[in-house]
Amino acid sequence: VSPEPTAPEPTAPELTAPELPLPEISFKQSFLDSLFRLGKSQETATSQDSYTALANLVRDRLLQFKTPEAHLKQGDRLVSEFSAEYMPGLHLASNLLNLDLTDLVGQAMQELNIKLDDLLAQEEESGLGRGGLGRLMVCYLEALATAKVPAIGYGIRYEYGIFDQEISNGWQIEVADEWLRNGNPWEVERSELAVEVQFGGRTEAYIDGQERYRVRWVADETVRGVPYDTPIPGYKSSAISLLRLWKAEAAENFSKVLYPSDTEFQGKQVRLKQQFFFVSCSLQDLIRMHLETDGMIATLPDRFALQLNDTDPLIAIAELMRLLVDEHGLTWDQAWQITQSCFAYTNHSLLPEALDYTQYALNLVGTLLPRHLEITLEINDRFLEDVRSRFPGDEDRVQRMSLIDERGDRYVRMVYLACLGSHAVNGVSALNTAILQHLIVPDFYELYPEKFSAKTNGVSPRRFLALSNPRLSELITSKIGDRWITDLEQLSKLEKFADDAEFCSQWRQVKQAMKQELADTIQQSGVAVDVNSLFDVQAIEIHEHKRQHLNLLHIITLYNRIKTNPHLELPSRTFIFSGKAAPDYSAAKLIVKLVHAIAEVVNADPDVQGRIKVVFLKDFTIQLSQQIYPATDLAEYISTAGTEACGIGNMITVMNGGLLIGTRDGSNLEIRDAIGTENFFQFGLTVNDILAQRPTYSPSEVYNTNPELKQAIDQIASGTFSNGDTELFQPLIHRMLNWDAHLLLADYASYIACQEQVSQVYADGDRWTRMTILSASRMGQFSADRAVQAYCRDTWRMLKE
């Protein structure tokens, strides 16, 4: 599978947003008034009270801006993102930056003898996602507001987000994420917009007054969905997007937990209920807004662009058909044309487990959503009739393309429904799109090639550079001005400073300062690290395809080399891990344990003399990531080629002056092409290599023919890192030697050789600094502003000619 060449996409237009006016009365007085409304004075207020008062004040200012609904009333088209995940991080600091109020508020607080940093520390992060998708969605909402494109992000208001991670004796312990325990001042309950969602029951056919065949759904359960709105402001644009999250009010509150385990039937049932609940609420809400401002159901596609992100919202296609046909009386053909015109689908994951989440058994769908099963079967019958007419006699193709998997237990293939029911389908990197087209849904790509395109992800330079790395931001602005904040292509102007000795020195000083801050955080966990060492970071979800255990095999190899030759010339390294393993993913949790087990041995060995340190930073959050990325020298994006759809942490790392070691996977390829292969540490098999080798691949053969690899694995197996316990890590050893689905062993030798190159380059400080400056200067195309403009132009048809 070869990705199509990635042509550079047009840069975002320069934004000329008006400056926000200063308040009519002093901000200090406004803050005191906000405290008073909480029943507090400055003398009686706690830090939490003061934070809440300030947050209320900022939120109210945001809600004075024109909302997406107000834009709709003026005839503007509106973008609606559907996603099960949103991770906005901490609102207060980000909102102050985007409102250009940081200095004003800081001065007002100082005059009141209040430290703004103390108030910022009070905020509870809402972990309403696992990682990349949640971060991306909020970056896009912020970028849309910056570009003044009206948008609403729809999802679920989980009472408990992703768990808080504690570590006990090296084991991950999941603690409930009670992010709402102190309330959430950033959201506004909109109970007047509540809707009802139905489940179960049966369907009844009837003939209506116009002698038309109709079907009604007689449900046996009704759930009330209540929306909560959170404003997401653009940067100095006087515009906001809305994050509208739905809370389920029912005896069984299935909006409590993010991603219930679906290994059992009950878990799959809850997950399907969650998915249907939020898309039904959202579609009802959109139709309400449309009818209130236009009154013509047939013009819905003219007013809304609906983006389905990843697998969870895909039942929306059947639900919109039900609403149009059953509730609003349209003919089937009218409803199908509207549905296809409204929806576009983005694939964010290539892992079989993620795609399997949307393969729901027919009996489950029929029990929970009987009318939607009927609609899906009708869509399938009509579609397969078309396939047979185009490919007469090709029944194999008909079976391959059916929305129903007839093998064994019958399943609905929701990804197929998404490809059929959307007018546009995209991956989130060039390689992701190529795999989607040629390996995941090749028949649909052959039938509808015009639907498919690549839309590489991008991140917000406001949150992940201006906000999280102010020192670097100030240095950049001092050299090229501040237009880069909304037009990241401006970073290219930095390239001419890559050989400027003074600028290089300042660049290194910024990195050193950020490494010191992270070292101070690490020190709190009881580990002292050398800030002059190479900070080698893998901060990402713990998963076998991310291959943290390949990283660990490298650490053991370095450890063994030092033990063999104590005088080995080798730059000191601090290996920093951070990430969460899914609660029901035993192999990933065992990897977390292995990180701690290796750290315990390596960090305490006097022969190593601190040349290697291994650290695990618990509870990886947006807030922690904003501290980690600016301090990273080398980031590990080492997933098995063909498994990572995109990745955005690698983008953030390079923007912040770090380098990458990575496989030819996801967005690594495009970053490499943008910054230059000479500035990217690349190793490992390609997707085509893996496809060719997998049928005959023997991990045990690789193990037996590589002495260093064999030694490292044998040490894990023999209890070297587990106080002699030879059973503890056997499940991991078994998976590596007898299965190795993610080809750890196949990539080991290439990875070790690449890491040797990293050490050689890092030893030359001037060369390393030059590489980081050149890399950062070439990251303009990885902005969220560029990404949403591409969607506006190609998918949503939002840009006016």
Image (spheres, grey):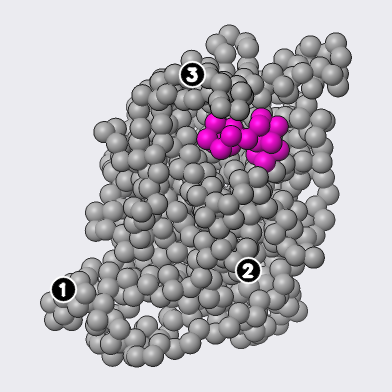
Which secondary structure, mark 2?
Answer: loop
In the depicted structure, whether residue 532 falls above or below residue 269: below
> Which quadrant holds the N terminus?
top right
* Secondary structure mostly taken by the magenta-highlighted segment of the chain: helix
Asked if marks 3 and 2 touch (Cβ < 8 Å), the reply is no
Asked if marks 3 and 1 touch (Cβ < 8 Å), the reply is no
Residue at label 3? 204
Q: Residue furthest left?
A: 44
Per the model, the C-alpha gap separating discs 3 and 2 is 47 Å
Sequence order check, earlier mark of 3 and 2:
2
Image point (41%, 36%), residue name: 197
Segment tinted magenta in the rendering: 320-340
Q: Amino acid at mark 1?
A: Gly
Residue at label 2? 147
> Is 602 in front, or is 62?
62
Which image quadrant for residue 481?
Answer: bottom right
| Residue 623 in view of the camera | no
Sequence order check, earlier mark of 3 and 1:
1
In the image, is residue 290 part of the stretch drawn in magenta?
no
Residue at label 1? 39
In the depicted structure, whether residue 80 falls above or below residue 1: below
> Which quadrant holds the C terminus?
bottom right
Per the model, the C-alpha gap separating discs 1 and 2 is 39 Å
Q: Residue furthest front?
A: 209
Image point (77%, 18%), residue name: 385
Sequence order check, earlier mark of 1 and 2:
1
Which secondary structure, mark 3?
Answer: strand
> Is 218 in front, or is 464?
218
